[in-house]
Image (cartoon, helix red, strand yellow):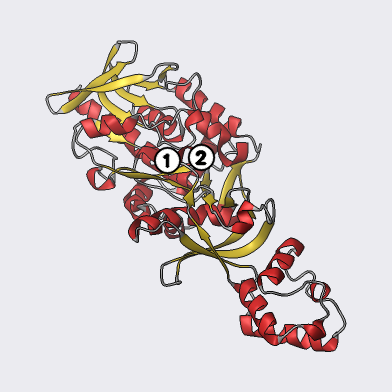
Amino acid sequence: MNYDVIVIGGGPSGLMAAAAAGEKGARVLLIDKGDKLGRKLAISGGGRCNVTNRLPVDEIIKHIPGNGRFLYSGFSIFSNEDIIAFFESLGIQLKEEDHGRMFPVTDKAQSVVDALLGKLEELNVKTYTNSPVKELIFADGRVKGVLLANGKEIAGGAVVVAVGGKSVPHTGSTGDGYAWAEKAGHTITELYPTEVPVTSAEGFVKTKTLQGLSLRDVAVSVLNPKGKPLITHRMDMLFTHFGVSGPAVLRCSQFVVKAMKKWNLKEVAMQIDALPDQNGEALFLETIAAMKSEPKKAIKNLLKGLIPERYLLFLLEQAGIDSGAPCSEISHEKIRKFCQLSKGFTFKVNGTLPLEKAFVTGGGVSVKEVEPQTMASKMMAGLYFCGEILDIHGYTGGYNITAAFVTGRLAGGGAAEYAAGVR
């Protein structure tokens, strides 16, 4: 059978593309190489599926540092509020949590997957699982269909490539689509991990001194070679056996990669401000005053509760202070050093975990070669891209999935309209 639209990839953007094409009356085939659809969606948001974010569009774009501005026209056609309305129309009630994150009331990602699959069934979308695509078929300057790995050819009026990037490969995103895009004449910008833990060879990492320690609501920065912050994120972080992780670090990770590349560095400095609401000089003066009022008290007891105990002992040691020493024996110079470390402990990092361990892929099909209103290829008629194969990436918190749903909606709708014209 001939199809109007063939969608390759059953992740968030592919499912949305298939639904959008089906709603326009197209005969749609959704192909996935895995054994079930929606695998990435089912594990998103820690298994709860953070379907979108309710912040204003300008704020969402700010949280998509990788070409977020490209999505402005897409948001004018299908916005985050439209995503919410779409899921509610499928019977999925949503609730808003911190920072605008939207979750299903059920707290189960599977309910979102099931609702989407139900919608596809209602629209008579044909689905193939366990069907890897070998290549796209091009002829006469346009896409004509797909060739499956088993040798079967399937004709289609338009093809939507929604196969993801190279992160989280166990869900099926192993970078298959880049070669197809290149064959169609597209540029693939350099791929790199984003939203990924950061590695370090510092002594305190090797000795596991701080391993397992979480710091809450700290300001973490990546510094340029002159020691000025390139980016700062204020969230929680975690020390690990290989370096640092946690939300603030994941958000900083792409800037570590970019700084190493830009300045050709083997190591980049990161900095932790454990007391972002306190002024450094005020902290110093308050500490000195407290020491004067309790000269016999051990410094570690005087400072108890200022920052987590393990981190406190670590910084005291870094400042050359014996944690058990009475306040009267400690010089102002050393206390100043401790206060400086509390406001800016700087350490070197040497990269990140590999792309396969990242939550999100940076780089991909150049957005300069894609129509922003339809996601149509500017290089090959009838070819559309959506989701993480595009060079668009955001922070975790519902931003990437929003980009996936918006681009999927536009790609599916655009493909259906194109196919109707070539029927």
Q: Which is nearer the eye, 112 or 119?
A: 112
Which residue is at a point 58% across and 71% down the rendered structure image?
344
| Res. 44 image quadrant | top right
Name the residue type under label 1. Answer: Ala
Q: Which residue is drawn at 31% across and 20% down?
A: 134
Q: Residue furthest right?
A: 296
- For the point 42% across and 67% down, the residue is 224
Mark 2 or mark 1, which is nearer the start of the sequence?
2
Q: SS class of the residue under badge 1?
A: helix
Q: Name the residue under label 2.
A: 357
Which mark lies nearer to you, 1 or 2?
Answer: 2
Q: Which of 260 and 322 is in front in this view?
A: 322
Residue 133 % position (x, y): 34, 20
State which quarter of the image contains the C terminus. Answer: top left
User: For residue 347, what is the image quadrant?
Assistant: bottom right
Q: Closest to the observer: 140 or 330?
A: 330
Please say whether residue 368 is visible from this viewpoint.
yes
Quadrant where the N terminus is found in the figure? top left
The x and y percentages for residue 223 are 46, 66
Is 126 located above or below residue 411 in the figure? above
Residue 267: image quadrant is bottom left
SS at mark 2 in the image: helix
Comparing 97 with 365, the one in front is 365
Count of numbered marks: 2
Mark 2: few/some/many CA within 10 Å (<14, 14-19, 20+): some
Q: Which residue is drawn at 31% across and 34% down?
A: 178
Instruction: Give how far across and how far down residue 93 sits, in percent.
Output: 60, 39
Quick check: can you spot residue 82?
Answer: no
What x and y, as percent, mark residue 170?
Answer: 51, 29
**In the displayed structure image, the side of residue 313 where residue 267 appears, left or right:** left
Relative placement, left or right, of 370 versus 42 is left
Residue under label 1, please give it: 404
